[in-house]
Image (cartoon, rainbow, N blue to C red):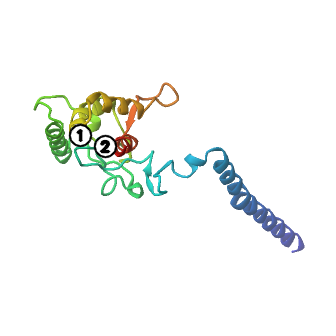
Amino acid sequence: MKKLFSEFRAALMVTLALAVVCCGFYPLVVYGLAQVLFHDQANGSLIVGKDGTVLGSRLIGQAFTLDKYFQSRPSAAGNGYDPTSSGGSNLGPTSSNLVNTIAQRIADYRSQNGLATNALVPADAVTASGSGLDPHISLQNAALQTLRVAKARGLSEETVRKLVTANTDGVSLGFLGEPGVNVLKLNLALDSLMAK
């Protein structure tokens, strides 16, 4: 019986020691290192205004509907860009609901941007990303929206194109994916340009 209690006490002590290390010490060390080495990323890559208000995150898209703004790609996350409901629509290619939704988005995109009824529309302009939170649009999508935004703001297309270029993120790790335009950063840059 003494041996059983001895084994039990040893197991309990090891469990307590591991709980302190794994549930206390290790998370605190990781949190501290993240705050020191990757402060911006560890806190959500937030974009903060001059008055200290949080305007959004570089990592999560937002819905923009006014003509003076570049519009993000559609979102299927909750009611749109809801990080607590991240995910796609789960509609398959044979879904009539998906086909009808995309057809309507194509027609709306062409109409909003003054395109011909048979103009090609970038896929990211009419389909949601897998997470529903993608903050980027393709360079082609941004180029097709440039004229509308320039007109709505009374700016030259060249000025708007320069802002698009300035807010384009390169490919991941130098070779993965394609460059993308961060819509929130671009729209904030347009707003700050107009505020001057």
The quarter holding residue 186 reads top left
The amino acid marked with disc number 2 is Ser
- C-alpha distance separating marks 2 and 1: 22 Å
Residue sitting at the far left: 117
For marks 2 and 1 on the same chain, the one whose residue lies earlier in the sequence: 2
Read off the residue under disc 1.
93
Residue found at the far bottom of this picture = 1
Residue 85 location (% of width, % of height): 38, 56
As helix, strand or loop, the secondary structure at mark 2 comes to loop
Q: Which residue is mark 2?
A: 72
Query: How far from the left and from the top, in percent, is residue 98?
Result: 21, 45
Mark 1 Cα shell of 10 Å, populated few (<14), some (14-19), many (≥20): few
Residue 147 in the figure: left or right of residue 42: left
Q: Which mark is residue 139?
A: none
Tally of numbered tags: 2
Q: Nearer the viewer, mark 2 or mark 1?
A: 2
The correct choice, above or below, for 83 with respect to 154 in the image is: below
Residue sitting at 11 percent across and 29 percent down?
118
Residue 159 horizontal/vertical position (percent): 32, 31
Which of these two is toward me, 155 or 14? 155
Where residue 41 sits in the image (x, y, percent)? Answer: 55, 46
Position of the N terminus by quadrant: bottom right
80 left or right of 175 in image = left
Secondary element under disc 1, as helix, strand or loop, is: loop
Question: Where is residue 27, by image quadrant?
Answer: bottom right
